[in-house]
Amino acid sequence: MNPSTISSSQILRDFLVDPTSIDQNLLCLICQELVVDPKECSQCQNLFCSECIASWLEKKKTCPYNCSKEIELKNPHRIVKNSISQIEVKCLNKGCGKQMQIQNLDSHLQQCEYQEKKCPFPDCDFKDIQKQIKLHEQICEHRIQNCKKCDSKYKVNQEHDCLVQLLQKLKLQEENFQVYQQKTDQVIRDLVTRLTKLEDSQKRPNKPKCFEGHELKWIYPKQGIQCESCKYANENIRYVCEICRAAYCQKCKMPEFNANICPAHHILQFSQKPAFGLKCDFCRHNIYSKGDSVYSDRTCDFDICNSCFQKLKLIK
């Protein structure tokens, strides 16, 4: 039996130091012996062993003490449990003459030299009391020892070759290294993929997209085409979707800003004096009229006033 469950077992009754000295209130009303794993009637406060009352309730639903109502069980008060735990018992193991309170029995059995145990070495079925097991371990043919030369563990009844052991260790290390290398390579590939996506997103932080999620292409201004968003045709069309053929005016789709290049990746040219009537593709104000300088690309007719340029540069 597991030592950790003995203190709540009926086997305890055979090892009581003085059964006649037990308080009558600690006896089971059914079996009239020391109550084990006690339950209490909520009306009369009599105690019952859990097994005894369970068997009783299979036949009747009333208290054995003939309480008026259907029995209602509860755990006894801690004072009752403490009283039971302080009863003196003898050690269950043959040869051990120690006595202790019930509450200390389980811990004693874990350390008792007369407790039967199995040899701890694998493949050995030898059983004996604990103090004999300690002697047996020194001569057990299944005992494990450590080689001082190669630091390998082996059974004393097995042949041992340091070279074979070292070769096996080397092979195992190579296999472990290959597994580690494969995992590392996969991690590196994943990181490279994530880094590539990150760099790509940084190169195109605000790439405009159509309603279907396709990236738009920046084109030379076209007029007279209806914008997919505002449904008007009185603004310059600057973006088109090459997949779904949708077109967007530059009022609905702001140009992509990327430092010193236009959305078509042409290098912008700076000028202190913008042409008369030139409008900023971002704020849509007349650059000449507000006396601002301009960054321009004449290849795709793109212009941004210095005020918008500096503002977007700070945001970026």
Image (cartoon, rainbow, N blue to C red):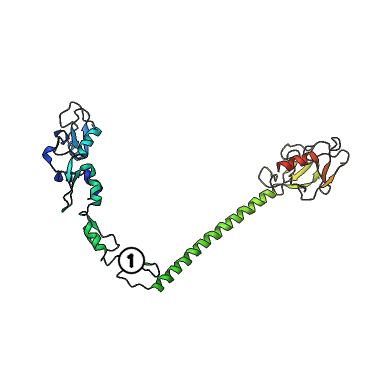
Is residue 76 visible in the rendered image? The answer is no
Along the line of sight, the residue nearer the viewer: 61 or 47: 47
Residue at the far top: name it.
Answer: 68
Identify the residue at the far left of this view. Answer: 20
Q: Position of residue 299 (x, y in %)?
A: 83, 49
Residue type, label 1: Gln
**Residue 153 in the image: above or below residue 229:** below
In this rendered view, identify the residue nearer to me: 108 or 74: 108
Per the image, the residue denoted by label 1 is: 145
x and y percentages locating residue 254 in the rendered image:
74, 41
Instruction: State left or right for residue 316 relative to residue 90.
Output: right
**How would you rate the neighbour count of disc 1 (Cα within 10 Å): few for under 14, some for 14-19, many for 20 or more?**
few
Instruction: Please name the residue shown 61% across and 55% down the image.
Output: 193
Q: Is there any visible trace of residue 187 in the rendered image?
A: yes
Residue 272: x and y in percent read 86, 42
| Residue 10 x, y percent position in the rendering | 18, 44
181 left or right of 124 in image = right
Residue drawn at (25%, 34%) of the image: 78
Does dot 1 land on a helix, a strand or a loop? strand
| The C terminus lies in quadrant | top right
Residue at x 58%, y 58% (from the top left corner): 189
Q: Quadrant of residue 302?
A: top right
Q: How many numbered marks are there?
A: 1
| Residue in front for this viewpoint, 107 or 291 | 107
| Quarter of the view holding residue 120 | bottom left
